[in-house]
Image (cartoon, rainbow, N blue to C red):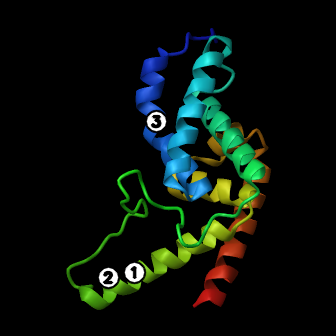
Amino acid sequence: MARQDPPPFEFVFSKYKERIFRLICQMMGDEEEAKDLVSEVFLAAYKAYHRFRGESDVYSWLYRIAINRTLNRIKRKSRIVSLDNPPGKDKRGEDIFHEVVSPRDGPEGLQERKEVIEAVRRAIAKLPSKYREVVVLREIENLSYEEIAATLEISTETVGVRLYRAREKLRRLIKYSS
């Protein structure tokens, strides 16, 4: 199979900027830092785009840059995501955990659902970064195991193990917080 030329960078930027922002926001838990990191990620990607070999798709390549930059920032700052500003908000401050509310749920059902979403958000924020990244990529970004493996440069088996362990930790964290 012949290698195809990558799409124009402007297309890549417009197509993936929101998803990269959500990913970084989930990892960092800070919208302002996420905005800053998105700029840094796309600048780094732009500078390296001429070297993109097409061994993975552009999406996976870009996500790998975003995750590496985000993890480096987290390590450099040596900080844990603040529970006062949990991840899960988009740049407009709206919840990225989509709530589906039935008219029969009423105010009690809506409040209970909000409490569950907040508990999940706090639990995700407490996960170690290697587990948080697979949860975000799988459960929020809806990537397949293969896409996550390519993005994180790990095997699909490792993705499965990390996801399993992350879900177990989430269960315990949510159980003990309620």
State the SS at label 3: helix
Name the one closer to the observer, 30 or 62. 30
Residues at circles 2 and 1 in contact by the CB criterion of under 8 Å: yes
Occupied quadrant, residue 57: top right
Picture coordinates of residue 76, whole percent (x, y): 76, 48
Measured Cα–Cα span from mark 2 to mark 1: 5 Å
- Residue position for label 1: 113
The residue lying at 74 percent from left, 44 percent from top is: 72
Front tag of 2 and 3: 3
In the rendered image, the vertical position of residue 68 relative to residue 125, given as above or below: above
Would residue 43 appear left or right of 11 to someone viewing this image?
A: right
State the SS at label 2: helix
* Mark sitting earlier along the chain (2/3): 3
Give neighbour class at mark 1: few <14, some 14-19, many 20+ (Cα, 10 Å): some
- Residue position for label 2: 110
Give the residue type that dot 3 points to: Lys
In the rendered image, the vertical position of residue 38 relative to residue 111, given as above or below: above
Give the residue type that dot 2 points to: Leu
* Mark sitting earlier along the chain (1/3): 3
